Image (cartoon, helix red, strand yellow):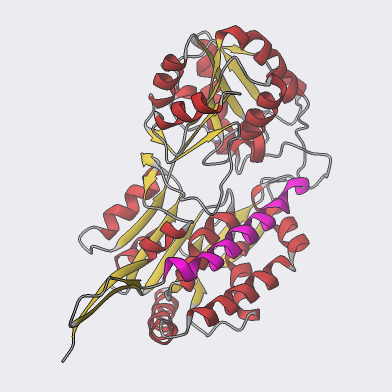
Amino acid sequence: MAIQKTISPVDGSVYVEREQADLGLVEATLARAVTAQRAWRDVPLSERARYCSRMVDAFVACRDALAEELTWQMGRPIAAAAGEIGGFEERARTMIALADGALAPIVLEDKPGFTRYITREPLGVSFIVAPWNFPFMTAVNAVVPAIMAGNAVILKHSAQTPLCAERFQQAFDEAGLPEGVFQHLHLSHEATEDLIQDRRIAHVSFTGSVPGGAMVERNAAGRFIATGLELGGKDPAYIRPDVDLDAAVDGVMDGAFFNSGQSCCGIERLYVHRDIFDAFVERAVAWVRQLRLGNPTDPATSLGPLVRPAAADFVRGQIEEAVAAGARAWIDPGDYPLSVPGSAYLAPQVLTGVDHSMRVMTEESFGPVVGIMAVDSDDEAVALMNDSDFGLTAAVFTRDRAIGEALTRRLDAGTVFTNRCDYLDPELAWTGVKQSGRGCSLSRLGYETLTRPKSFHLKHA
């Protein structure tokens, strides 16, 4: 049986080892899921909500242990790790609360001699493939609403964060959820593809890379099943000249560097009006220089390692190419002794003199670097923001509410912000355009991809 190893970015040690599921375990898991779902779909929604609420209670009761495990698995500073548990709780409880309205039958106007209505029916077994960067919050986006909608769930978590799947299982077990409604598997890439192809899988939710999303589409092709794909991002922000400069710097730089830049909706491109460009860059560089790169288990650390050395070296390559092409790097990597080639630790960086011929402004970085360009008008900013293969989120910082809203209407993105960024409101639909994916999670609309409509056209005898 194959063994998967989780190498901690904290110190390069093996933190977790798990056996990957063999064909027998996969088959047994699928069979249990199918059987359990047939009964679960008939459980009243109010009872499903009680199970899921008890799961959330059990989960958040382990906040400190979950935070420590998260830090060791993927490197987020311990000072920020527990915040993900709060985000998990907010999303889960919101989706539980929205289920009654989202899943309620649509009753049509009276038509003499007929009763007509539309219900939302569960799909069956939902296969959820979750990433390592926000391992609890991304998974819960699909897990809780799928179960609330009457589906059974099989969760496959990243090999970097296998304990996260087990913590989901533990919480559902403590909540007394019927056996087989929620299960998890540790799977190889090949086994993941095979499971997507299995006729008993009725829905796939995937969060990850663009190539990963293409893999899902290839393996689901011809089966006509629902898929939700949240993929890459190269999210932009525009800083207009009328802003509160300090507030804009705080907001957008936190959006760029939180989680070491490893956020699908993190800010990776900045467009600043030329009238305030120099002042903005000065403050932004000062903000970044206050970050402390170090061991993430130290509460004083504010910038942890990337998930693995190869990820850090990828970003180093983008930065080096940009500088060679004429960009200016404002941060001296020599000030960060841990930041050396071949290490997961990477010095933060701010670049100016960049343009869209450089990979650092067009290709997802997923690291602690941001490029800043000067623009002369709103129109130029919008054109540059939309000049991307991605479209997950985009932000405009301005004091003028009307102008800000008008500009966001012109942006090609699934979520648009004014005066904030890198945030997910669970009452709003989470979706992307272009290579950022397709489908929708969260909000009332998120239930539509986890169910199918069934029409009742009943003629009176």
User: For this rendering, which residue is in front, 403 or 225?
Assistant: 403
Dominant SS in magenta: helix
Question: Residue 44: within the magenta?
Answer: no
**In the image, residue 172 above or below residue 98:** below
Viewer can see residue 175: yes
Viewer can see residue 2: no
**In the image, residue 313 above or below residue 351:** below
Asked whether, in this view, residue 344 is left or right of residue 240, the answer is right
Q: Residue at x 51, y 75 (%)?
A: 182
Q: Residue at x 60, y 64 (%)?
A: 93
Asked whether, in this view, residue 312 is left or right of residue 283, the answer is left
User: For this rendering, which residue is in front, 155 or 40?
Assistant: 40
Q: Residue at x 46, y 64 (%)?
A: 187
Q: Quadrant of residue 306?
A: top right
For the record, the magenta segment spans 78-103
Q: Position of residue 343 (x, y in %)?
A: 65, 35
Q: Position of residue 262 (x, y in %)?
A: 58, 40
